């Protein structure tokens, strides 16, 4: 039984400190907006991973410079997070380095975005 159950389940996505993510709960908590739930965004963000915690939990924090910024931190489960997509490509932003010199285009885009948002 357990083997059958585990075979059909997806492995939890692993994030690193500094990765940009979108958060599902933040978008659905807005009861005061005039937009219906059908048209509202399912995910809100981006947020930065501040700390990796046990049991697939992450401490996320708001990024200074993003529209609607308020100083904010929350501990969230991995199933309510999604990677923040790169601008203009099908890749995702993460802290992974795949090239020989240590910088990929996605990593460079992520660092440029963080610099832009924090300035």
Image (spheres, rainbow, N blue to C red):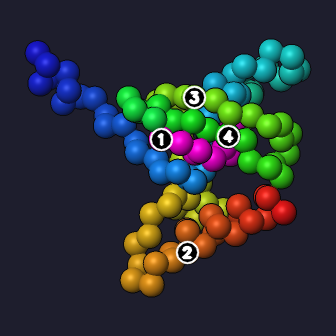
Q: Which part of the image, by quadrant, shows the C terminus?
A: bottom right
Residue annotated with mark 1:
52
- Evaluate if marks 1 and 3 touch, with contact meaning CB atoms under 8 Å apart: no
- Evaluate if marks 3 and 2 touch, with contact meaning CB atoms under 8 Å apart: no
Residue 102 in view, yes or no: yes
Residue annotated with mark 4:
61
Real-space CA distance between mark 1 and mark 3, rounded to the nearest whole angstrom: 10 Å
- Residue plotted at (63% across, 47% down): 48
Say whether disc 4 or disc 3 marks the residue closer to the N-terminus.
4
Q: Residues within 10 Å of mark 3 (few under 14, many from 20)?
A: some
The kind of secondary structure element at disc 3 is strand
Say whether disc 1 or disc 4 marks the residue closer to the N-terminus.
1
Q: Which mark is residue 103?
A: none
Q: Which mark is residue 75?
A: 3
- Name the front one of labels 2 and 1: 1
- Evaluate if marks 2 and 1 touch, with contact meaning CB atoms under 8 Å apart: no
Residue annotated with mark 2:
105
The kind of secondary structure element at disc 4 is strand
Q: How far across and down, in percent of the image, does residue 113 sit?
A: 71, 63
Say whether disc 1 or disc 3 marks the residue closer to the N-terminus.
1
Question: Which region of the structure is painted magenta?
Answer: 42-52
Task: Give the tally of numbered discs.
Answer: 4
- Evaluate if marks 4 and 3 touch, with contact meaning CB atoms under 8 Å apart: no
């Amino acid at each position: 039984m357990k083997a059958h159950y585990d075979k059909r389940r997806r492995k939890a996505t692993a994030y690193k400190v500094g990765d940009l993510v979108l958060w599902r709960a933040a978008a659905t908590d807005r009861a005061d907006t005039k937009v219906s739930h059908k048209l509202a965004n399912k995910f809100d963000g981006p947020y930065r991973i501040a700390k990796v915690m046990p049991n697939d939990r992450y401490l996320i924090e708001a990024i200074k410079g993003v529209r609607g910024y308020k100083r904010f931190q929350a501990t969230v489960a991995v199933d309510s997070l999604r990677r923040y997509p790169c601008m203009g490509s099908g890749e995702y932003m993460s802290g992974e380095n795949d090239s020989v010199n240590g910088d990929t285009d996605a990593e460079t885009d992520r660092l440029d975005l963080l610099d832009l948002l924090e300035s």
